[in-house]
Image (cartoon, rainbow, N blue to C red):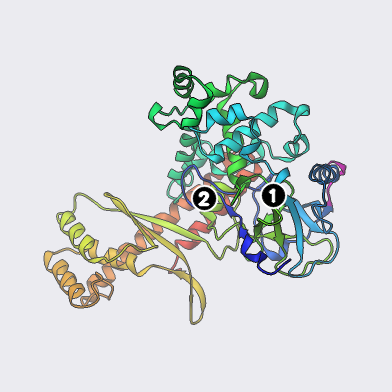
Amino acid sequence: MAAGTSLLRGVASRLGGAVVGVPRRLLPRSAAVSRSRSQSQATSLEDDHCSAFLHWLQTKAGTRISSVLAVATSSFGRSLVALEPIKEGDCILEVPYSVQLTEDKLPQEVCMLLDNLVGDTAKVAVLLMMEQHLGHESGWESYIKSLPCKDEMHNMIFWDLNELHMVRNSSVYNEAIEQREHAKKELSAAKPVHTLRPSLFLAYPFPLACLLMSFPICKVLERFPHLFGEIKLENFMHASALVSSRAWRTSRGVSLIPFADFLNHDGLSNSILLYDEQKDVSEVIADRNYAVGEQVMIRYGKYSNAALALNFGFTLSSNIYDQAHTRVDIPYEDPFHWKKLDIWERHHGPKYEDMFCCSYNKTFVIKEVKFCGGKGVGVPQILRAFFRVFHATSLEELEEMSTEAARDDGRLARRPLGNKEREIHAHRMLLLHLDDEIQSYLTAIEGNVSSRGVGRKVLIYEFACASAVLCSPFL
């Protein structure tokens, strides 16, 4: 590649962070399983259908997608494996933009109506719904057939309320519920006239344009029965989950990238999907050597197990990015409730990445940390400080902590209390709180027998176990 080309190659990022309605990439898995480098050996090459899929894709692209990878079945399900030795730095696949599913491939009349209603992720979901309905008439039939059906997907938008209840104390419980509600609202969304773009009025007379845009998305799509058939919420949720969990965002927008989305996740990998603007292709560069038959993996992102379960439908048994959130409710019956809140807000300092606040509780992050003897699970100092403050029993204690904070670096209760009994009491209450968190996850593990399917049971079990371990820093 010519000098300077690297400036035109950008990282193709996953869709969003921990934001409702912007989930991440999901693996086409029939069951949620743990992943590690030691388990990267494929078991068998896939059948003729998958070979035909790669042939179809390369014919459609008019170029070779990969000469070193093949679709295979591993302990993770569908995977990509090395057909020949791969060396670190090799480009292992290139998928042209022309064969990626993107919003600009929607019919113009559909795209124009949706332009003011939804974002680019939902537009690609609508495109996917259209191609699914077209069936044999779709130019993407081979790719559509390779995608998992709803029952094979275990990301939390598809969990029922009983399954979600098992992890109700986790950091993603509310997010999972909100994701589902977001999909429902998006399908029935209607935008006011003042938000419309001028292009709509260039294509339609003013009264008709206003009428069209007062309809929710489902009503817009119903105008094209030959493209979408009957519009059902479950189909929209399935398509949205496929897109927002499998797609990448590049400088060209949101893209579903056939073949590349068969790559499984390894949190230790340094390989990521890149977009080369000069060649207009998405590509992956090997981060290490691979032997023939070995599964090739990339890193989707630095995600905790909660994020992976929420948006991808699996967890990792050894996840270096794992973390758990513990929520501490602030009891209103405490006679010093408002005094403690006032002192805390004045002295706890700037916003910390390991704490989230709202008016009635605080949420703290517990994650693996490094120390001189190796690694362990660390209780954030700010969580210890919080328990010192909110388990104080007198105004004198509170004023003493406030005075010390003002005299030192301004941070409240960061040092052990001078009164050893009070210090022991604060940590005892912290231990009791964490023990309650652990018990809730153990209850989820014990009640897991009611969940649907082996894959869902394994996922809930692994997620609950990982969360329980993270909440056990003193064990």
Q: Are marks 1 and 2 in contact (CB under 8 Å)?
A: no
Q: Using the image, determine if residue 407 lies above or below residue 347.
A: below
Is residue 475 left or right of 156 when viewed as pictured? left
Q: Quadrant of the N terminus?
A: bottom right
State the residue lying farthest toward the front.
202
Task: Please rate how many residues cluster around mark 1, counting C-alpha atoms within 10 Å: few if below 14, some from 14 to 19, many from 20.
Answer: many
What's the amino acid at mark 1?
Asp
Asked if residue 9 lies in the magenta stretch, the reply is no
The circle drawn on residue 16 is 2
The circle drawn on residue 111 is none
Q: Residue at (27%, 75%) from the top-left corner?
A: 416
Asked if residue 48 lies in the magenta stretch, the reply is yes
Indicate the position of residue 11 as horizontal and vertical percent values.
60, 59
Indicate the position of residue 174 as horizontal and vertical percent values.
43, 44
What residue range appears in magenta? 45-49
What's the amino acid at mark 2?
Gly
Q: Estimate the spatial distance between the alpha carbons at disc 1 and disc 2, rounded to whole Å.
A: 17 Å
Q: Using the image, determine if residue 407 lies above or below residue 94.
A: below
Q: Which residue is mark 1?
A: 261
Is residue 182 left or right of 290 when viewed as pictured? left
State the residue lying farthest toward the left.
396
Q: Residue at (30%, 51%) from the top-left corner?
A: 358
Q: Residue at (67%, 20%) from the top-left corner?
A: 226
